[in-house]
Amino acid sequence: MRMGTFSPENSGRSVHVNRLEIQTERLLLRPPTLNDVAAIHAFCDSPEMAWCMVGIPAPYPIEYAEKWVRDCAIGLDEETKYAFVICLAESGEVIGDTMLKRDQRDNRAELGYAMGKQYRGNGYAFEATSALVRFGFESMLVNKIFAGCWTTNTASVKLLEKLGFTREGVLRKHDLKWGQYHDDARYGLLRSEWMNH
Ligand SMILES: CC(C)(COP(=O)(O)OP(=O)(O)OC[C@H]1O[C@@H](n2cnc3c(N)ncnc32)[C@H](O)[C@@H]1OP(=O)(O)O)[C@@H](O)C(=O)NCCC(=O)NCCS
């Protein structure tokens, strides 16, 4: 497995990668284990999470959380999916997750993220995803990071724009959830853009 080595230049806030743990000022990102299933279930099992996530139903069965953890372990082994639970550095409490799914052929990765509803609005998602984007460009060495987000998902749109992503287009009425069609905005950030930011 390739380990990340981050150089301090270009970094803004300091980020340390060690055995696939990413430390930021307030957070620790680490691969999920089966011990995290209950915590993952707790933050995913809410309509506030499910409404905007294609793969998350409400209610969210605990078996889904367990399957996700197992899939993450396989993805990490195969170096196709780098998924992390986001923990508060001080308490170790699991408050969300974030991941990069690698597309080897095109040397790009898809960014995903979710934050438990009681932890939102504190800058945690920005802190975690900034570090993961850095990991993608510096350790995975991808050329592009992309993300999809419904145009009605204001928080996610804001987060991607704050991360420096460009809206590249909108797939109209592309996804169907709970009887409603959603416009899916496609966002991308190129390595060259990130290097010069
Ligand atoms: C998207 C999400 C991860 C943001 O988490 P968060 O920890 O609240 O985000 P942050 O606190 O780091 O905020 C990042 C930026 O988004 C803004 N923001 C966050 N929630 C917002 C909201 N509801 N409305 C408008 N802006 C919002 C913040 O103000 C901040 O911008 P600022 O610094 O300029 O003020 C969280 O809302 C979430 O988990 N949503 C459900 C899952 C989801 O949408 N996943 C992505 C699917 S595409």
Image (cartoon, helix red, strand yellow):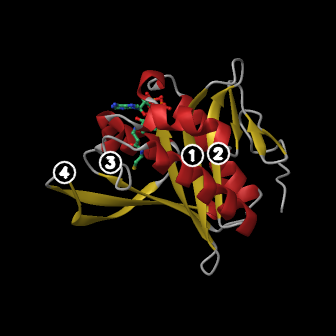
**Going 46% across and 33% down the picture, which residue do you hit?**
43
User: Residue beneath label 3, please?
Assistant: 57
**Going 38% across and 55% down the picture, which residue do you hit?**
55
- First-in-chain label (1 vs 3): 3
Q: Ligand 1 falls in which quarter?
A: top left
Q: Residues within 10 Å of mark 3 (few under 14, many from 20)?
A: some
**Looking at the image, do the residues carrying marks 1 and 3 touch, with CB atoms under 8 Å apart?**
no
Separation (CA) of disc 4 from disc 3 = 10 Å
In the rendered structure, find residue 84 and report the number of the disc placed on it: 2
**Looking at the image, do the residues carrying marks 4 and 1 touch, with CB atoms under 8 Å apart?**
no
Separation (CA) of disc 1 from disc 3 = 18 Å
Separation (CA) of disc 4 from disc 1 = 24 Å
Q: Residues within 10 Å of mark 2 (few under 14, many from 20)?
A: many
Looking at the rendering, in which quadrant would you find the N terminus? bottom right
Can see residue 79?
A: yes
Residue 93 location (% of width, % of height): 63, 24
- First-in-chain label (3 vs 2): 3
User: Residue beneath label 4, please?
Assistant: 178
Give the foreground label among 4 and 3. Answer: 3
